[in-house]
Amino acid sequence: QVQLLESGGGLVQAGGSLRLSCAASGSFFRTNTMSWYRQAPGKQRELVAVITSGGSTNYADSVKGRFTISRDNAKNTVYLQMTSLKPEDTAVYFCKCNVYRYGSGYVDYWGQGTQVTVSS
């Protein structure tokens, strides 16, 4: 199996910063695309940022210029550096990791989610 362990969420004032981490562990050959999603109360889950195995990145328009996604392939870990946080960034943040498993091919796994709350 594959486990994703997220950390770094919390309460921060508007304008502040947080760094989320998501480490993948378990039985897989390698990680592929890694991404962050978020879900605010009463809203659908939305893609925040994605990074390919080669390091190419893409961001939701709402976070461009404020959030940075990065990864450490040696640690199978993806990060989300969030700056200039706004109250509307308040949500549960989930990481998703696409991994290659022998016998299964490429499979998506989700983290348990970490709460980010931005106060005004």
Image: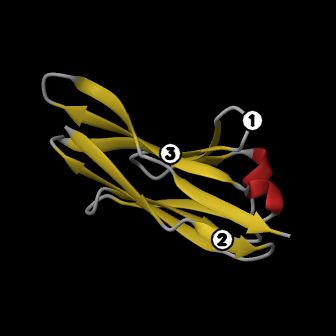
Residue drawn at x 49%, y 49% is 113
Q: Which numbered circle lies on residue 24? A: none
Query: Where residue 101 appears, x then y in whole percent?
Result: 19, 32
Mark 1 is on which residue type?
Gly
Give the secondary structure at mark 2. strand
- Residue beneath disc 3: 35
Quick one: label 3 or label 2, which is nearer the N terminus? Answer: 2
Q: Is 75 drawn above or below residue 29 in the view shown?
A: below
Query: Where residue 98 appears, x then y in whole percent?
Result: 36, 36
10 Å neighbourhood of mark 3: few (<14), some, or many (≥20)? many
Quarter placement of the N terminus: top left
- Residue beneath disc 1: 42
Q: Nearer the viewer, residue 110 or 99?
A: 110
- Whether residue 51 appears in this view of the structure is no
Q: Nearer the viewer, residue 41 or 7?
A: 41
Give the secondary structure at mark 1. loop
Query: Where residue 57 appears, x then y in whole percent?
Result: 56, 49
User: Does residue 75 appear to the left or right of 55 in the view shown?
Assistant: left
Mark 2 is on which residue type?
Leu
The answer to whether marks 3 and 1 mark residues whose Cβ atoms lie closer than 8 Å is no
